[in-house]
Image (spheres, rainbow, N blue to C red):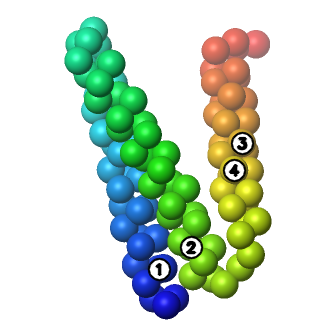
Amino acid sequence: MIQSYKRKSKIAAVVFVAGVAGSFVLAGYDGNKLVDDVYGPLLVGAWMAAYWLAIWWYIQAKGRERTWILAGFLNLIGLIILLSKITRKTACPA
């Protein structure tokens, strides 16, 4: 059972990384309405679902409680704070 969760987690992680890379590729298509309105939300939804599924299956493989999914949420909040501090320093040089 644990091997099954590990395999699923790795597959979801690959889908997540591919989705993020695809988002950067689609960002290069400025002004294309089809890309912005159709593919953008689908791709973002796919990589968000893959992220949470990868975390969920990893938690299950480790045999931890379900509340450990909050660690993934805190990880995202920490990343957002880190990126905001980096952009704030580069945007307003002292």
Q: Earlier in the sequence, mark 3 or mark 2?
A: 2
- Rounded to the nearest whole Å, what is the CA distance between mark 1 and mark 4? 20 Å
Q: Does the rendering let one see residue 82?
A: no
Q: Residue at x 54, y 71 (%)?
A: 57
Circle 4 — which element? helix
Q: Quadrant of the C terminus?
A: top right
Residue 67 placement: quadrant: bottom right
For the residues labelled 3 and 2, the Cα–Cα distance comes to 19 Å
| Mark 1 or mark 4: whose residue is earlier in sequence | 1
Q: Which residue is mark 3?
A: 77
Q: Are marks 2 and 4 in contact (CB under 8 Å)?
A: no
Mark found first going from the N terminus, 1 or 2 = 1
Of callouts 2 and 4, which one flags the residue occurring earlier in the amino acid sequence?
2
Q: Circle 2 is placed at which residue position? A: 58
Label at residue 6: 1
Q: CB under 8 Å between callouts 1 and 4?
A: no
77 lies left or right of 22: right
Rounded to the nearest whole Å, what is the CA distance between mark 1 and mark 2?
6 Å
| Mark 1 in CB contact with mark 2 (< 8 angstroms) | yes
**Residue density around tag 2, few if under 14, some if 14–19, many if 20 or more, within 10 Å:** many
Against 69, is 42 above or below? above
Q: Is residue 78 above or below residue 71?
A: above
Question: Real-space Cα distance between discs 2 and 4?
Answer: 14 Å
